[in-house]
Image (spheres, rainbow, N blue to C red):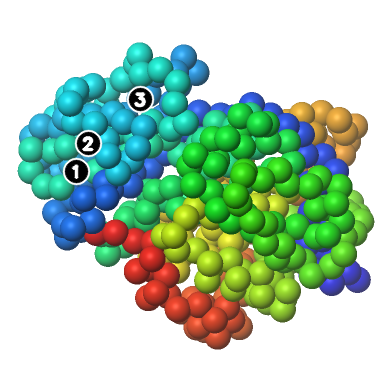
């Protein structure tokens, strides 16, 4: 019988073997407050929902809900801390959906939603639209259970960075990426070395604690699901995993952008994102949605990978390429079984000061 660590490594091996580059997908982004809005209390920000989605034609669809506000003016800019107020690009009521077009090319467009009552809010598309890394996305912009907001542009999650283009690297440098945490094994890193933006440093934190991902051997869809569930538990319990996530969470602050990734950006990276967002107080349904979004961002790559397999094997291996609610649930079950609760996991398992982390990454 294989161990949970071996099963996790096996799933990672399949992902590494079948990962393909795919175009970035236009998927919803969540909101982040403007820097000056941090001076207001969370209750002063009337927005309870806000998204910005870049469409294939370069336009943006903005949607929001701001109970208590009667009118919202939208401004656009390429610097989230200094979104221009000179020209409004859209208007709407307290709840509205609008389209903004004709903005031109930029590393990233930010939209400040200014209500007639309460503090403003800045939104941006969650994806950076890197064709070379389709699962590269911002972890900021989520609203916490107590009404604060995760800072935008501070922590990114991603898949393999070995195919980043020179244009991608220049964009990441301009966006302030300073540290890249590589969660992969040494063999994965050697096979597909990261390309880093100028001035960024790489930190190797091997979640699996093994030299390679090993081999995979599953015979049925259920066996594949069981492998992934056990693997998720291992990401909580293994010494190597605790060490890796401890270093990652303790490095997340507001002194420059951090990126963390594995091969597909969904399992090892998925648990890291879930742990960070949970530590910040983001509601579990939001954490789950962020975790499951890998299925959307990697839809084309997964379909292409499965197409390489004989039809009889596609159903067997599909669970290894996807993320599913039961995988993430197994990680949180392991937290409760071993530590009694998430706060204890952070303190005893990872050595993370949750309050300091929130001071670093929350506003409002």
Q: Residues within 10 Å of mark 2 (few under 14, many from 20)?
A: many
- The CA span between labels 3 and 1 is 18 Å
- The CA span between labels 2 and 1 is 5 Å
User: Which numbered disc flags the more N-terminal residue, 3 or 1?
Assistant: 3
Q: Mark 2 points at which residue?
A: 113
Q: Name the residue under label 1.
A: 120
In the image, taking residue 150 as reference, residue 20 lies left or right, namely: right
Q: What element carries label 3?
A: strand
Q: How crowded is mark 1: few (under 14 residues within 10 Å), some or many (20 or more)?
A: many
Residues at discs 2 and 1 in contact (Cβ within 8 Å): yes
Q: Residue drawn 8% across and 38% down?
A: 116
In the image, taking residue 22 as reference, residue 146 lies left or right, namely: left
User: How many marks do you count on the picture?
Assistant: 3
Q: Is mark 1 on a helix, strand or loop?
A: loop
Q: Position of residue 175 (x, y in %)?
A: 48, 42
Q: Mark 3 points at which residue?
A: 61
- Tell me which corner region of the image, top left, top right, bottom left or bottom right, holds residue 338: bottom right
- Tell me which corner region of the image, top left, top right, bottom left or bottom right, holds residue 362: bottom left
As displayed, is residue 295 above or below residue 214?
A: above
User: Which numbered disc flags the more N-terminal residue, 3 or 2?
Assistant: 3
Q: Is mark 2 on a helix, strand or loop?
A: strand
In the image, 317 versus 274, the foreground residue is 274
Select label 3 or label 1 by which is in front.
1
Q: Residue drawn 15% across and 47% down?
A: 119
- Is residue 88 visible from the viewing direction of this image? yes
Q: Position of residue 41 (x, y in %)?
A: 17, 60
Q: In which quarter of the image is the C terminus?
A: bottom left
Q: Residue drawn 64% across and 56% down?
A: 201
- The CA span between labels 3 and 2 is 13 Å
In the image, taking residue 265 as reference, residue 184 lies left or right, namely: right
Residues at discs 3 and 2 in contact (Cβ within 8 Å): no
């Amino acid at each position: 019988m294989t161990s949970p660590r071996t099963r996790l490594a096996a799933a990672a091996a399949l992902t590494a073997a079948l990962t393909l580059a795919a175009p970035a997908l236009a998927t919803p982004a969540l909101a982040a407050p403007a820097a000056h809005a941090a001076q207001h209390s969370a209750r002063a920000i009337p927005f309870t929902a806000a998204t910005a989605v870049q469409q294939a034609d370069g336009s943006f669809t903005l949607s929001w809900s701001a109970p208590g506000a009667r009118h919202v003016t939208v401004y656009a800019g390429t610097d989230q801390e200094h979104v221009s107020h000179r020209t409004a690009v859209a208007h709407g009521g307290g709840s509205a959906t609008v389209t903004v077009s004709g903005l031109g090319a930029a590393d990233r467009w930010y939209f400040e939603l200014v209500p007639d009552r309460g503090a403003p809010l800045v939104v941006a598309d969650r994806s950076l639209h890197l064709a070379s890394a389709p699962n590269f996305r911002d972890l900021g912009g989520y609203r916490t259970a107590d009404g604060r907001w995760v800072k935008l542009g501070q922590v990114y999650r991603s898949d393999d960075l070995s195919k980043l283009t020179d244009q991608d690297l220049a964009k990441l440098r301009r966006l302030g990426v300073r540290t890249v945490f590589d969660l992969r094994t040494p063999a994965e890193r050697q096979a597909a070395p990261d390309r880093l933006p100028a001035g960024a440093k790489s930190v190797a934190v091997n979640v699996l604690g093994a030299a390679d991902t090993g081999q995979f051997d599953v015979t049925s869809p259920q066996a594949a699901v069981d492998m992934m569930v056990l693997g998720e538990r291992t990401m909580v319990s293994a010494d190597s995993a605790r060490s890796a996530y401890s270093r990652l969470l303790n490095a997340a602050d507001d002194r420059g952008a951090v990126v963390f990734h594995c091969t597909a950006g969904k399992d090892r990276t998925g648990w890291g994102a879930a742990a960070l967002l949970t530590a910040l107080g983001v509601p579990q349904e939001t954490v789950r949605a962020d975790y499951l979004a890998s299925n959307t961002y990697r839809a084309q790559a997964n379909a292409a990978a499965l197409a390489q397999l004989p039809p009889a094997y596609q159903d067997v291996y599909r669970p290894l390429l996807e993320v599913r609610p039961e995988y993430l649930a197994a990680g949180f079950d392991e937290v409760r079984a071993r530590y009694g609760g998430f706060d204890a996991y952070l303190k005893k398992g990872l050595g993370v000061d949750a309050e300091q982390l929130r001071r670093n990454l929350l506003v409002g």
